[in-house]
Image (spheres, rainbow, N blue to C red):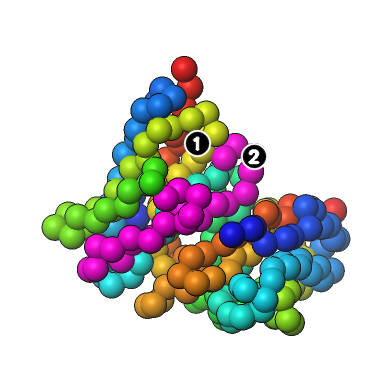
Amino acid sequence: QVQLVQSGAEVKKPGSSVKVSCKASGGTFNNYAISWVRQAPGQGLEWMGRIIPILGIPNYAQKFQGRLTLTADRSTSTLYMEMSSLRSEDTAIYYCARASAVPDYGAYETWGQGTLVTVSS
Amino acid sequence: QSALTQPASVSGSPGQSITISCTGSSSDIGTYNYVSWYQQHPGKAPKLLLSDVSNRPSGVSNRFSGSKSGDTASLTISGLQAEDEADYYCASYININTVFGGGTKLTVL
């Protein structure tokens, strides 16, 4: 059974960058897309983008184009989400989530525990 | 890409059935049979309930069922139980992206 374990909470200043990791264990890593989804306090889920580790090619939601970078380290089965030019509205819990099938059609069966990113001066 | 539209809240009594709608457009739900549903309890990560409109992953109760008509998908929960009280989100695949609904809070009376 695949597990996703994310890095710990972060506090960042406006204008800075944050990098969150998501380590996969216990199953097939390379073929299944990993998406990143965020949830602002008291708000709904927002899909940010995905990457297929074996290909290493990400695609991003239009809203995050230019600010979001998704990468995969196949040697350590770890995914990374880096967001730049942070603003207070980016304060949220960030989740990594593994697609339930190949290809990925938007169903995510395995989720990380979430990483709280707080952007505050 | 706009979020899918869900009712903000629904409620029901134990044992009853409820339905949560998820309205999109001809570009997403109307085109693709790739609608998924998630349940989220406070402080927890979302849990996948249904994929591809109506497919239940292993371990998900058959009290949860899904359907789609035109641009609207629906989640039905039958035999409502106290532990069903949670937030529910729909999601649709669209042109290599995924879009979520705004979420629906289910209250079990």
Tag 1 residue: A90
The verdict on residue A91 being magenta is no
- Between A7 and B68, the residue placed more toward the observer is B68
Tag 2 residue: A42
Instruction: Write down the chain letter for disc 2.
Output: A
Q: Quadrant of residue B108?
A: bottom right
- Between B64 and B104, the residue placed more toward the observer is B104
Q: Position of residue B28 (x, y in %)?
A: 61, 72
Q: Quadrant of residue B47?
A: bottom right
Name the residue furthest left: A75
The verdict on residue A46 being magenta is yes
| Label 1 secondary element | helix
Q: Which amino acid does label 2 sit on?
A: Gly
> Do marks 2 and 1 share a subunit?
yes
Along the polypeptide, which appears first: circle 2 or circle 1? 2
Disc 2 versus disc 1: distance between alpha carbons? 13 Å
Query: Residue sitting at 55 percent across and 52 percent down?
Result: A46
Q: Which amino acid does label 1 sit on?
A: Asp
Span of residues in magenta: A40-65
Query: Residue sitting at 51 percent across and 75 percent down?
Result: B57
Query: Residue sitting at 31 percent across and 39 percent down?
Result: A19
Instruction: Write down the chain letter for disc 1.
Output: A
Q: How crowded is mark 2: few (under 14 residues within 10 Å), some or many (20 or more)?
A: few
Q: Position of residue A79 (x, y in %)?
A: 28, 53
Q: Where is residue B22 in the image (x, y as percent from the top left)?
A: 72, 67
Q: Where is residue A15 in the image (x, y as percent from the top left)?
A: 40, 27
- Which label lies toward us, 2 or 1? 1
